[in-house]
Amino acid sequence: MDRILRLHALKALLLALLLAAPALASAQTMSFEEAAAILGASCGKDLDDNCRGVNLDPTRLKDCLLRNQDVVSAQCKADYPRVFSAIQQRAAARAGVFKVCEHDAAKLCGGAEKAEALQCLMSAKRGVSIQCSKTIADAGYR
């Protein structure tokens, strides 16, 4: 039961990371469900054993795993940097999608608000720039 609660907390943490990450470059990203599954499978026992009582926000969680890297499992050591990096990239793409796609939205979607402009860009058959299309995909909207 405690492990299930930790997995739910981990999903909430990843969602918070999505909403709080700064807008930077985008690259290959990972869904929050994939990230939670990987972290739960790879690091669940390590988190239970070494990070009990730690507030599960991204910074504290990473700090705890780094601080305890001597006793963290090899699988967790291998997976958590990749997972956090992919999630940060997805969050950055989401934070920057409107800036990257601003010109395309103005050209194709008129004065549509952000949500409507995103829907317009995703449904456009032609005219969306490669960078805008890539950012939309990296953000997980496609």
Image (cartoon, helix red, strand yellow):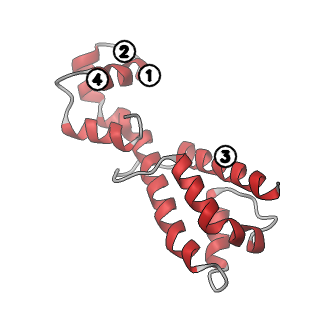
Residue at position x 35%, y 53% in the image? 28
Quadrant into which the N terminus falls: bottom right
Is there a contact, CB below 8 Å, between mark 3 and mark 2?
Answer: no
Where residue 45 sits, quadrant-wise, is bottom right
- Dot 4 alpha-carbon crowd within 10 angstroms: few under 14, some 14 to 19, many 20 or more: many
| Front-most of residues 113 and 79 | 79
Residue type at the position of mark 3: Ala
Is there a contact, CB below 8 Å, between mark 4 and mark 2?
Answer: yes
> Circle 3 — which element?
helix
Is there a contact, CB below 8 Å, between mark 1 and mark 2?
Answer: no
Q: In this view, does 105 lie above or below 40?
A: above
Residue type at the position of mark 4: Ala
Q: Is residue 118 above or below residue 42?
A: above
- Dot 1 alpha-carbon crowd within 10 angstroms: few under 14, some 14 to 19, many 20 or more: few
State the residue position of label 1: 115
| Front-most of residues 22 and 11 | 11
Spot occupied by residue 128 in the image (x, y as percentages of width and height): 21, 29
Mark-to-mark CA distance, 4 and 3: 31 Å
Identify the mark at residue 105; answer none if there is no mark: 4
> Circle 2 — which element?
loop
Q: Quick check: 54 left or right of 140?
A: right
State the residue position of label 2: 112
Mark-to-mark CA distance, 4 and 2: 8 Å
Residue at position x 59%, y 53% in the image? 36
Which one is closest to the eye, mark 4 or mark 3?
A: 3
> Circle 4 — which element?
helix
Residue at position x 61%, y 46% in the image? 16
